[in-house]
Amino acid sequence: MDLGLRRFRLSLAILLIVGAAQVSEAGIKSERLLAAILRHTPSPRLVAEGEQLKQAEAVAASVPGAQALWGVGSSMEPLYASNTAVVVTAIDFEAIRKGMTVVYLKRNGRRVAHSVVGETRGGFIVQGINNDQEDAELVTSENYIGVITEAYASADSAFRSDLTRRLTSKPADRGVGRG
């Protein structure tokens, strides 16, 4: 094989590896925001495969107004994998804070669970932690269902523990104007 073809193949391989690495880093990048999500969003409790929704339903039945929902999709991975069951409890809309994971009803009738990343006069800005962009719709008092208070999964990801370890190993941020 001639040297030019080898260099071309090597360059192509490097581009593919770099591209794949960038794709795997999709989603929310702000460590401050990720730390808020870890603080305000419950980690899933591990249960046997097939028991996720049963566990969530049992807990929801004991909490007035709570409901159990079955999560599908990849927008909250790796924090919540597809097939994670969650308990959703309505709290006062004014008590919602950045980092909480809320469930809301989109205009198309689908329920979505995403994390609060900001606030405007019109409502809360939310985003799936694995999504590159914020949701197009705001969470308002009219479409808000509740916040995730419990989660049940049959498999764990190292995401929460790895991120927590990384964030706690950094020097403390002594900045002003947190919120």
Image: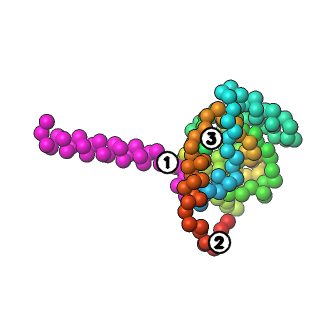
Q: Residue at x 78, y 54 (%)?
A: 93
Q: Residue at x 34, y 42 (%)?
A: 16
Mark 2 neighbour class, 10 Å CA radius: few under 14, some 14 to 19, many 20 or more: few
Q: What residue is shown with label 2?
A: 177
The label shown at residue 26 is 1
- Which callout, 3 or 1, points to the residue nearer the camera? 3
Would you say 118 lies left or right of 7 here? right
Q: Which residues are magenta?
A: 1-30
Mark with earlier residue (2, 1) = 1
Amino acid beneath label 1: Ala
In percent of width and height, residue 153 lies at 66, 35
User: Marks 1 and 2: in contact by CB < 8 Å?
Assistant: no
Q: In terms of image quadrants, where is residue 3?
A: top left
Asked if 134 appears above or below 62 in the picture, the reply is: below
Secondary element at image label 1: loop
Observer-nearest residue: 33 or 168? 168
Asked if residue 27 lies in the magenta stretch, the reply is: yes
Mark with earlier residue (3, 2) = 3
Secondary element at image label 3: loop
User: Marks 2 and 3: in contact by CB < 8 Å?
Assistant: no
Farthest-out residue, left: 2
The label shown at residue 80 is 3
Instruction: Quadrant for the N terminus, please.
Output: top left
Main SS of the magenta part reads helix
Instruction: Quadrant for the C terminus, please.
Output: bottom right
Mark with earlier residue (3, 1) = 1
Amino acid beneath label 3: Tyr
